[in-house]
Image (cartoon, grey):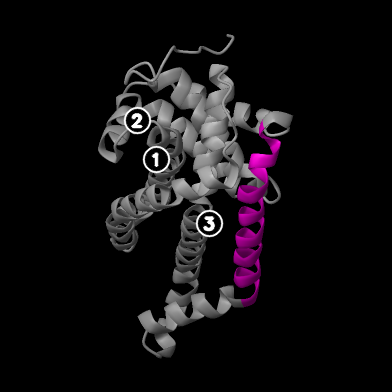
Amino acid sequence: MKGNPLRGASYLLRGLQMLPDPSIRHFVIIPLLVNILLFGGAIWLLISEFEVWVDYLINQMLPDWDWLEFLRYLLWPLLALVVLVIVYYSFTLVANFIAAPFNGFLSEKVERQLRGEVSADEGWGELLAMIPRTLQRELAKLAYYLPRVLLLLVLTFVPVVGLVSPLLWFLFGAWMMSIQYCDYPMDNNKVSFGQMKQLLKSERLTAVGFGGLVQVGMMIPLLNLVLMPAAVVGATLYWVEEHAPVVGGGTQIRPAR
C-alpha cells in the first residue's frame, strides 16, 4: 500500500492549529455546537444505560443456567466493547448527518483561503443551496458504511476472527473517518463518491493515518468536541495538497517541510 500515515495524521494536527484563525472562526461555530450537543448526549446515555444494555445482551445470549454463569464474566468485556462501538458510531453518524451542510460550507471557505481566492460571502443563501447535495452524499456514505459495519459485527462473534476484531474495527473506523471528512472538499469540487474512494485508495496509508488520528481524537474527552471542525479543515488541507492537482483542482500547495 502506498502513502505515509504520519503525513496523513499531520493534516488533522494542522486543522486543529487553524481553528482559531479569525477568517474561518465563525464558520466553525455550528459544527462545534452540533458535536458538543450530540457527544454530550452520547456520554449521558452511556452513563445511564450502559450496564443495562450489556446485561440485556448477555441475558439474550445465555440461558438461565447456573453452570453457565462463568460465561457471563467472559462475555461481559466483549459485549461492553460492542455497546461502546455501536453508540460511538451511531452518534458519529447522526452528528455528521446534521452538520454535513455546515461542514461543506466550512470546507469551501477554508479552500478559498488556502488558494488565496477572494469572493463575495453569500452567507445563508449559499449554505441553503448546499443542503440537498451534502445530504445526498451523506446517504451515499451511509449506504457504503452499513453493510460493512454489519459484517464486522458478525465477525466479532466468530471464533478466532473475533480475537482480532478490535484491530479490524479500528482500521475500518480509520478508513471511514477519512471518507467522511475528505468527502466534503471533494464534493465541493464535484468529485464523485466513487472517484473520491479511488483517490483515497491510491494513497491508502495516508488516508488511514488521517482517519486513524481522527478516530483516536474522537475518543479523548474534551478534545473530541473540537475534532469535527478540525477534521473538516484538515481534510481540506489534505485535498488541496494531495489530490486537487490530480483531478484538475488547481495548483498544488505543499506544506513547509
Name the residue tied to disc 1.
179
Q: In which quarter of the image is the N terminus?
A: top left
Name the residue tied to disc 2.
200
* Label 3 SS: helix
Residue pictured at 47% horizontal, 37% vertical: 211
- At label 1, which amino acid type do we have? Ile
* Measured Cα–Cα span from mark 1 to mark 2: 8 Å
Q: Could you tell me if residue 202 is visible in this image? A: yes
Which disc, if any, is residue 192? none
Magenta residues span 24-48
In reply to whether residue 40 is colored magenta, the answer given is yes
Q: Nearer the viewer, mark 2 or mark 3?
A: 3
Q: Residues within 10 Å of mark 1 (few under 14, many from 20)?
A: many
- At label 3, which amino acid type do we have? Ala
* Label 2 SS: helix
Q: Where is residue 219 in the image (x, y as percent from the top left)?
A: 59, 50
* Label 1 SS: helix
Between 126 and 161, which is closer to the camera in this rendering? 126
Residues marked 1 and 3 touching at CB (< 8 Å): no
Name the residue tied to disc 3.
95
